[in-house]
Amino acid sequence: MKKNNRSVSERRDRMLGVATGLPAIILLCIFTVYPVFYLIYRSLFDGSLISPKKKFVGLDNYVEILSSETFHKVLMNTIIYTVLFVGLTMVLAIIIAVWLNGTRQKKLGNMVQACIFTPHVISMVSVSIVFLWLMEPDTGFFNMIITKLGLEKYPFLSNPKTAMISLVLVMVWKSVGYYVLLVMAALQTVPKSIYEAAELDNTSKFRTFFKITLPMISPTILFTCVVASIASFKIFDAVNVMTQGGPVDSTNTLVYYIYAYAFRLGKPGIACAAGVVLLVLVCIMTYVQFGVSKNKVHYQ
Amino acid sequence: MGTIQLRNVKKQFEKDVVIENLNLDIEDGSFTVLVGPSGCGKSTTLRMITGLDDPTSGEIFIDGQKVNDLTPGKRDIAMVFQNYALYPTMTVRQNIEFGLENKKVPKEERARRVKEICEIVGLTDYLDRKPSKLSGGQRQRVALARAMVKQPKVFLMDEPLSNLDAKLRGQMRVELIGLHKKLGTTFVYVTHDQVEAMSMADTIVLMKDGYIVQQSSPRELYENPNCVYAAQFIGTPQMNILKDVLPEGKMVGFRPEKLSLKPVEEEHITIKASVTTKEMLGSEIIYSLESKYGSLMAKSEHEVDDDAKLELSVPFSSMYLFGSDEKRIALDEEAKALIRKAFA
Amino acid sequence: MESYNRDIALHKLGRFMNAALKVVVILIFIFPFYWMLSTSLKDLTEALQFPPTLIPSSLHWENYAHVFEVVPIAQYFRNSVIVSLAVLVLQYLIIVPAAYSLSRHEYKGKKLFFGLVLLGQMIPQQITFLPVYFMFSKVKLLGTLLPLILPFISNPFGIFMLRQYFMQIPQEVIEAAKLDDASNLKIMFKVMMPMAKPALVTIGLLSFISTWNSYFWPLIMTSSESLRTLPVGVAALKSSETLQMWHIIMAGNVVLVLPILIVYLVASKRIRNSFAYSGIK
């Protein structure tokens, strides 16, 4: 048997490595690893928020949510929201990014960039409250414009048909600046000489965008879409401040459902089961993200 | 016809005047090389011909037509970029066809032209590959093919060989010369490498600080440079220029290869010098020498001992005389007498 | 010649339209801020007037004093400051050694540690909140600000980013320091950290902004008024005694938005670059 001959300094090196990493390891275990396991564990019990008494019910919680119409609606809403948000945001972001990237009005272009990014830095609460006020059914600014155009006042957030899309538009307003930033970074990896070659080939602006620019940035776009989708699954703040999941559950999304069952309806077992569903979704999408990110490295 | 004329062209970037007043004539069917150190304006000039940059003032004519207001795509020209600028997401075939598609060339015609070009450049086996799967030399050929297939009036090339290794570069040089002979189209070629310029051009345009120093054939430039700068730009090692030997700031110049280690018959001057270093190049030897007139370089087939003390001969027929303004002046009898006196 | 002039005119028109469109876009994104401010300076009747006025008829600065009276905004503000600063400072103590450990030491389990960091980036707070809530409840720490601080000081993104930066420091620089007889601690502080300054700034900026703006986590972890942070407090404005008092609500909103806006105005480019880095990595 070979004897492990480690020098003293190597040993000290190892110990130092472990020692410096230990605080982070402990914290991560407590606040990331343990909660995941506990979530799964707790989802197999019923019980309430306040009393520690709980009874093992196996997969009953899962059966209950998976057969619940509300939960189905919640899942649908979350997916619809994600598709709408990611779709709208990315299309807008690409259009704006290409527009700003190719503009000759540099100073003005920079101002536009800085301004559209501003909503992204402030709190979601602030944005929600402002838009709640702007969309106010009786005295809101938007309704002033609408009445000036001769139409009837519109209750954006209290109409089940329009609540979701109103929510989406608010979120798009908040986030598009960030995605413009990402798309612009991708655009800047396209060497100028390729555009010049296309100019010499007498290519129209349209054709240049669809046949050259877009294919070249598409790996980044795809990656960004996946990342944006993962972020969309987690939407809560706007829902809680603007619509509280209503009207008639039309904006009830997964995290709001979990929150409601945990803290309003006092059923942590159900909440944990729904949390596990979210966990599965996040894991799947993260796996996809990983796969997509491999294609991101393009050519020199 | 692929003639090019630049008239009173000025190019200014913000406060920087890169090109003051350029007048250039490029003959149809010539292989014209714009050469000079970086910053001399050669690439800028090329880009103004393409239309990718616009002159601050002045006019540009291609084939007799003023092109200042024409977009690059409408000038009937093609360009090969230094880094090839191939469309990375398209195959070789698509890269070559792209310009033809924009011109609405019908499908059969396109296929025919692509096939023809690929045979000339040697790309037939690679038509369905993407640029990332090609070597540097292959990418270069694609860039060439893409330019050639458009059958333009003028080919413009911006240092196309500088990203290749030395061996490939030599190969491609020969191929480009052959291509030019075959096609007969005007080639305008930019490089900083004087060897490339001398070997490929039929007309060299030597540039410095935004103006043309000399425009002539390679042989003419070598044998009759019109100033010190031109004389020293061509030829390795550089021409020996001796200052402070003649009165009134005049300078004498002679090429290292014309500095004879053995006595010569024709009228000449002699310079005593000692050898400091020898560089063996195989077929010839480069000597660094010290003389009372300063350091000199010589290039010869003959070998002498290290530390040898030599008497070098410079025939008047190989000598150049430059004024204090560095411009070339005639070597008449009066000048010869002056020189004889200075080197006595 | 005529068509040439016409082309120039069209070109100029195109440029003008382009600029005009940019201005419109700027307005779309700035207007809600203006509306927030404008409403906060109106009195009750004017605020609820329909159709609303674009500019307040007079500036009622007392609304801001009012909002501080009606709800303990000062307390909320204080809590936000404490939490944001605590996370900002404490996390450096955790993530710098962690990144250092991951980048320049070898030991068994290092891969596991790195996996843990990646896991931390992957698992969102929307999944961990309930178990962590129970955890803090059990140890009776829910009555403090600690639940808002502790889970975030092991910022996995920060560890990840710093590790990358540390890894890019050439080995020769470290070796030169070792030859200069520097202790490991000294190397970390005097050599590696200064070279990673941009990363530290980015991490700090992103962390401060995200902690200040955080709503979900403080909502869950704090039930008493005295512990609320600003976003939670301001959100509550719209459903408490200040219901429908939009001028007061907006005043509270301005208080919430202002610190971040000021930071953004000062360091806009830096902040955008930080976000870009975090989005591309």
Image: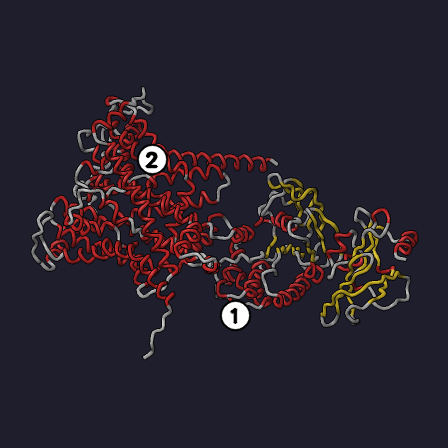
B80 and A199: which is toward the camera: B80
Instruction: Give me the disc on residue B228.
Output: none
Q: Is residue C28 left or right of residue A58?
A: right
Note whether C200 is above or below B162 in the view shown.
above
The quarter in which the N terminus of chain A is drawn is bottom left
Q: For mark 1, give the secondary structure.
A: helix
Type of residue at label 2?
Pro
C249 and B280: which is toward the camera: B280
* Residue B26 in sight in this render: yes
Which residue, given by chain and number where applicable, does mark 1 sit on?
Answer: B125
Q: Is residue A195 left or right of residue C51?
A: right
| Identity of the residue drawn at 74% across and 50% down | B213
Instruction: Give me the disc on residue C259.
Output: 2
Q: Position of residue B209 (x, y in %)?
A: 68, 47
Q: Position of residue C103 (x, y in %)?
A: 38, 59
Type of residue at label 1?
Asp
**Circles 1, 2 touching at the beta carbon (< 8 Å):** no
Q: For mark 2, give the secondary structure.
A: helix
Note whether B84 is above or below B53 in the view shown.
below
* Residue A218 in sight in this render: no
A242 and C96: which is toward the camera: C96
How far separated are the C-alphas under marks 1 and 2? Answer: 63 Å
Q: Is residue C199 left or right of residue B244?
A: left
Q: Position of residue C63 (x, y in %)?
A: 26, 24
The chain to which mark 1 is attached is B
